[in-house]
């Protein structure tokens, strides 16, 4: 087992990465300070992992199991309210701990409920998808979606611990596994060219879900994320680079309806667009786009925009993005592979040029 | 105009107290960093003050007015969602400022919406009731109610400024004015015996709404609250003393249905009960209860529990209070007038004795 630390002063917490983490109940129990626990999971994950988590919890004064429907389309204020209803009905108090067992959707909603229940209770993340393990479980971003935009309602609420059991990846469907790889690729692109090069070599072993390669990819991703979060907890500055590919990606997710495209799939296409824009500005070699497309395709990820999305739809949806400040769209681009920067001077003309070409490619490949 | 400061490091903010604060637009505008503002108010308050606030705001890129129905019964997740819908529909971004113009209900909901919109945007409080001016506008507590308990869903989200215009009190209905005085009395009881003595002398001038007495009462209340909040922002310790009378009070509000008893009215009765319990323990002179009842009655506040609330109903509702930790009810009592303490060893027997006697008194006076 490896342990990383997210350094945030009084809100610091450990991230444990390893196999079969629940065989040692002490690891989980040391992060639960009261006698009350609420396990939040979903219909797909609960039967697989909740019994093991319950066993590790041992005897408790109160354990509530909250099983949500599975899917991004349920990441709503309505489901958030359902979690709070259950906590209140079972009389959970301020010293309770909310335990999220599942992917990013479960973690985001359980975390937001923990942030708001009685103005904030403890929260432990047990991410069971690659996406959640390398991205959403670390950093304290919690949220639900709104029909007008993704993650528009939420809070910064750091967990007290993150337990990443790599064994959970063996039951992950291939499409979801690939979606997680998109975020792993992102870390290489934005801040570690060496890791990016390693990924190009290691992709076959990752796709075969070889334990050592998985642990290495997860640990390097979490370490990079922990550094960025420690430097900028509430996204006042450098943390924004973690959104590389996400502004385009969110537009795709919103246009297609949540749950039809997986987040990682939309981010994969978004990264291609953002890299292409960086190349259009002459910041990276045009050949870098082909290398990225090849890497993503080898990971079974899409690289083209949905054929039914005209540029105007992108532009409208991007104008509503959280990264818009005083009317200026902020985008993450690459100065070079491994070096991201945030810009707010991208013109509508540049975007139209980029998106028209992208539509052309999407038409050709369909 | 007087200026206090709530000292919370990077989250410090000023509290301005004075007359006609909007005649100097600069005062408000220095706390609004972007071109977008959302004014949240209610049907009663909006016609009285929103035009003056709008004038002080001058020309802006975007001003959204969100006018809520008036009353504690609307302090719900449903109204919270309505505020967020409006912000999204008008495409407010992360640099927007939410401006709460109204009483505690408006401030709590606007503040919670500001806390959650895009994971947190700026928030300025313009409290227009005495209760909001001396209590809820300072300290960063925001929340909505749930059918199973008051303020159960919320966040700590500090404002960037609080503007207390004492002129707004002249249009406040007598019952709401009295409800605010309950919290003023609370500050004296929990931490300033001198202020408590002053209140007993100054009550006639306060009831006549004499400017100098009002300004003095508001400033001393805010200063006491600012000190407590600076020492303990998230209620890990000393801040809990601000809940003096509130555990009993919340039980009354919940049992009677939000909005039927005003918060300050319920707190007035709650303070009498908490002081009586302190006397029952021999910590304060029995005569102190009579002095408090006389002071509250002179301020036209209730001192007896609702006649239809049996002790069992109190005990059930109090068990759900946020101040319950690991099954132990935490209550604020007085060691002496001006000196509050938090205890977690009150027995059911003590509470039954207290409440049975209280029911007896309520029956007699009805």
Image (cartoon, coloured by chain):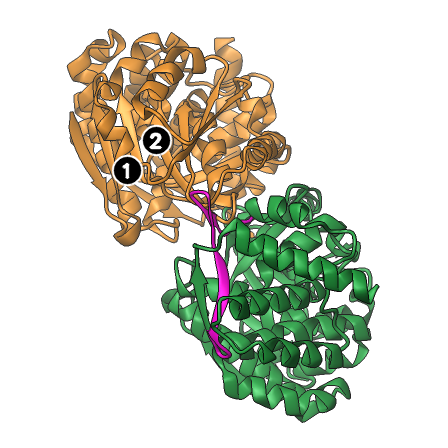
Chain colours: A orange, B green
> Residue beneath label 1, please?
A225
| Image point (61%, 84%), residue name | B217
User: Mark number for residue A343?
Assistant: none
Magenta span contains residue B333: yes
Mark 2 to mark 1 CA distance (whole Å):
7 Å
- Give the SS element for disc 1: helix
Taking the image as shown, residue B225 lies to the left or right of residue A290, namely: right
- In this rendering, does residue B87 appear at all? no
Classify 10 Å Cα crowding around label 1: few (below 14), some (14-19), many (20 and above).
Answer: many
Q: Nearer the viewer, residue A243 or B356?
A: B356
| Image point (55%, 31%), residue name | A83
Magenta stretch in the rendered image: B321-339
Q: Nearer the viewer, residue B348 or B38?
A: B348
| Image point (39%, 53%), residue name | A236
User: Mark number for residue A135?
Assistant: 2
State how many labels appear.
Answer: 2
In the image, is residue B361 above or below residue B56?
Answer: above
Report if the CB atoms under discs 2 and 1 are less than 8 Å apart. yes
- Give the SS element for disc 2: helix
């Amino acid at each position: 087992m490896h342990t990383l630390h997210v350094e945030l002063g009084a809100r610091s917490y450990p991230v444990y990465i390893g196999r079969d983490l629940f065989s040692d109940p002490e690891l989980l129990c040391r992060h639960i300070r009261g006698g009350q626990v609420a396990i939040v999971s979903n219909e797909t994950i609960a039967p697989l992992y909740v019994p093991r988590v319950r066993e590790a919890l041992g005897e408790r004064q109160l354990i509530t199991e909250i099983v949500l429907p599975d899917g991004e389309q349920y990441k709503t204020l309505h489901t958030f309210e359902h979690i709070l209803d259950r906590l209140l009905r079972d009389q959970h108090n301020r010293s309770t701990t909310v335990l999220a067992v599942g992917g990013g959707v479960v973690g985001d909603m359980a975390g937001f409920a923990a942030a708001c229940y009685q103005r904030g209770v403890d929260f432990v993340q047990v991410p069971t998808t690659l996406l959640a393990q390398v991205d959403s479980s670390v950093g304290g971003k919690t949220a639900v979606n709104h029909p007008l935009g993704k993650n528009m309602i939420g809070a910064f609420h750091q967990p007290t611990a993150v337990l990443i059991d790599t064994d959970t990846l063996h039951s992950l469907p291939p499409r979801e596994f690939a979606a997680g790889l998109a975020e792993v690729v992102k870390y290489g692109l934005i801040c570690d060219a060496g890791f990016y090069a390693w990924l190009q070599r290691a992709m076959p072993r990752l796709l075969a879900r070889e334990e050592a390669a998985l642990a290495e990819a997860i640990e390097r991703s979490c370490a990079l994320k922990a550094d960025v979060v420690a430097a900028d907890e509430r996204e006042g500055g450098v943390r924004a680079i973690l959104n590389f590919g996400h502004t385009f990606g969110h537009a795709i997710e919103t246009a297609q309806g949540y749950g039809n495209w997986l987040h990682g799939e939309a981010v994969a296409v978004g990264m291609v667009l953002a890299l292409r824009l960086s190349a259009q500005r002459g910041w990276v070699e045009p050949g870098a786009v082909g290398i990225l497309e090849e890497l993503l395709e080898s990971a079974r990820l899409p690289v083209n925009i949905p054929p039914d999305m005209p540029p105007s739809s992108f532009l409208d949806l991007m104008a509503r993005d959280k990264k818009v400040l005083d009317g200026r769209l902020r985008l993450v681009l690459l100065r070079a592979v491994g070096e991201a920067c945030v810009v707010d001077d991208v013109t509508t003309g540049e975007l139209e040029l980029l998106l028209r070409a992208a539509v052309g490619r999407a038409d050709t490949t369909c």
